[in-house]
Image: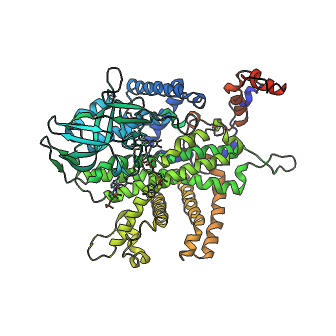
Amino acid sequence: MEGVGEEEMEGVDHLAHERNKSEFDVDAMKIVWAGSPHAFDVSDRISKLVASDPGFRKDNRSTLSRKELFKNTLRKAAYAWKTIVDLRLSEEEAAKLRFYVDEPAFTDLHWGMFIPAIKGQGTEEQQQKWLPLAYKMQIIGCYAQTELGHGSNVQGLETTATFDSQTDEFIIHSPTLTSSKWWPGGLGKVATHAIAYARLIVGGREHGVHGFIVQLRSLEDHSPLLGITVGDIGMKFGNGAYNTMDNGVLQFDHVRIPRNQMLMRVSQVTCEGKYKQSDVPRQLVYGTMVYVRQTIVADASCALSRAVCIATRYSAVRRQFGSQNGGPETQVIDYKTQQSRLFPLLASAYAFRFIGEWLKWLYADVTQRLQANDFSTLPEAHACTAGLKSLTTTATADGIEECRKLCGGHGYLCSSGLPELFAVYVPACTYEGDNTVLLLQVARFLMKTVSQLGSRLSSKKPVGTIAYMTRVEHLMQCRCGVQRGFAELSADLVEAAVAHCQLIVVSKFIEKLQQEIPGKGVKQQLEVLCNIYALFLLHKHQGDFLSTGCITPKHAALANDELRSLYSQVRPNAIALVDAFNYTDHYLGSILGCYDGNVYPKLYEAAWKDPLNESVVPDGYHLYIRPLLKQEIRTARL
Ligand SMILES: CCCCCCCCCCCCCCCCC/C=C/C(=O)SCCNC(=O)CCNC(=O)[C@H](O)C(C)(C)COP(=O)(O)OP(=O)(O)OC[C@H]1O[C@@H](n2cnc3c(N)ncnc32)[C@H](O)[C@@H]1OP(=O)(O)O
Ligand SMILES: Cc1cc2nc3c(=O)[nH]c(=O)nc-3n(C[C@H](O)[C@H](O)[C@H](O)COP(=O)(O)OP(=O)(O)OC[C@H]3O[C@@H](n4cnc5c(N)ncnc54)[C@H](O)[C@@H]3O)c2cc1C
């Protein structure tokens, strides 16, 4: 390796001049981003703990084979659990530890879906039996809903659970190839138990899809139990990325489980073979998905802010063209085109942070109501979680890819962190509900609301996120018959659903600004970002706004002028606004985004560490290159 001066590598903050330009209190913004001083403290402490522990190293992921990668994930998961137990971390701290370890693992499905499914759909008795085992990780669970033939259409699942009153058991069976469970994370190689979704059949009658706790593997030697065929479904998109997860395939061959392993909060089967439905709505069978969609919205701002942090820091380091009188070239962040692509993403990261916070509140509220048997806000909660999951994950996946392009050629290197971030993030547009399918759910909710507007039969006034509907004269006029022709108009309805969700994001950002926000200049910066978010949308969709007469061409031009001015206001604060995310270099995992901006020596050094550079003359030279050069290729044995 050519020598790189030590002084170039260490100690110098190449972004110091940028940090000095900032016009607001970055520490106060860090608290706003984290949510509270307490949340900041936990996040800051745990991120440093993970970054300083070699046990959580992740810089070699993209070069490991699948088997090495997976074994390494098992090691990390065990090490993370030991850390949690040894340091007696609280649930909040443990969740942060998982976040900063930054590697999808079977534990996500155990904590994120298996346990919530038992909590949400299990009876008190079932919770008392299963949760203590799950909390101590004496059993490891997964969420086995999707099948080879059906994912979106949950009611189309084919696995059956037939009640046998003679033995007081259910017989779980996969009748066809397409009924094989396919995709569940953690299932492939690790889970000992699954919440398996199957069509319930009692006394020859079918009662739709229900959840069942099924043991898959022996707790002694991990071998599959009688009647269970289970394995991994194979490599997925990208190196490293989601390949740390053992997404699995599972077939049941008449597997018997005791009757009390059907999750029975929503409906019950008695030992006499009677099916009983409680007054809890059937949709609660889908409750775990609502919970996870809400966490996915909260996570979107993390993934987007990470990409934006990398692209913003690198844009301040990178210079191209514009040198005058032998002076330095222009920082690419000073180009208006770069700003018009980057700053709306920066604004989106903040907008998604606040919508994630709000959705958490909404979810906590609906959960409390459900416990008190008030189911009135469930449809709105479903529409909000589904719609916002769709909006934020689509924008985040697209945003990460845009950040890669904003970093030019170097963004394509794995050491930029962006390829792996994209590969690990993009399935969020599909899992927990394909984004289009979820928007159709929002559209259905909106159309149902519109059809009820002013109806003499319905005394309900739209409240919450749909309260605005009563104020829209046009909707009042076209309220009849909107359910007819739904499929025909679905592409337009999906656009309407996105617009509805954008309205929620913008209004919640504005509501956030109405709160007291301490710290010099912090509120002003957030106002600028909020205006960018809203005006960028208006600019992007000006055709719709103009064609519907909501704005005039003059308004559209003014909005565009204002956007340019807002970008200039963000420019001196851009680096400080991404510093406020408080990400360690370990978490960012990106040379382009490193805190000190010392990009070039680090890129240079990293290149020499690539396994391909372990020898000067590559493996294969004598077999393939030399014969080619010597024109011996026709006689060589390939
Ligand atoms: C101590 C240590 C701590 C460590 C901490 C570690 C924490 C780690 C956390 C990690 C977080 C988790 C990571 C997650 C990784 C994700 C992995 C992925 C998992 C999955 O993908 S699971 C499978 C998900 N599958 C889907 O999402 C399927 C999508 N399809 C559906 O949801 C539905 O089938 C449907 C909604 C599209 C349509 O359903 P269906 O046809 O049955 O229904 P209808 O359209 O007829 O609707 C009937 C009425 O029900 C309402 N509805 C539908 N869904 C819901 C719902 N979910 N809730 C409430 N209501 C719902 C409809 O609106 C209809 O109502 P209407 O009034 O009749 O109109
Ligand atoms: C990484 C990853 C992890 C996963 N983890 C799990 C897990 O732990 N547990 C689990 O059970 N599942 C899991 N899944 C499965 C996941 O939930 C499903 O893949 C997802 O719900 C989409 O369903 P699908 O694959 O059936 O897509 P499809 O529904 O087949 O979608 C294909 C296309 O059809 C379109 N489409 C479908 N229906 C309609 C409609 N009604 N109208 C218009 N267009 C439509 C979609 O928009 C899409 O473009 C995982 C998936 C992935 C990728």
Q: Nearer the viewer, residue 316 or 159?
A: 159
Residue 552 horizontal side relative to residue 388, left or right:
right
Name of the residue lying farthest toward the front: 635
Q: Nearer the viewer, residue 62 or 270?
A: 270
Q: Residue at x 30, y 27 (%)?
A: 226
For residue 564, which quarter of the picture? bottom right
* Colour style of the rendered protein structure: rainbow
Q: Residue at x 28, y 37 (%)?
A: 213
Q: Nearer the viewer, residue 159 or 632?
A: 632
- At which x and y percent is residue 62? 59, 32
Is there any visible trace of residue 302 in the rendered image? no
- At which x and y percent is residue 438? 43, 55
Name of the residue lying farthest toward the left: 272
For residue 12, which quarter of the picture? top right
Q: How many marks?
A: 0
Residue 120 horizontal side relative to residue 547, left or right:
left
Q: Quadrant of the C terminus?
A: top right
For residue 125, which quarter of the picture? top left
Q: Quadrant of the N terminus?
A: top right
Residue 272 horizontal side relative to residue 94, left or right:
left
- At which x and y percent is residue 308? 60, 47
Is there any visible trace of residue 278 in the rendered image? yes
- At which x and y percent is residue 500? 45, 64
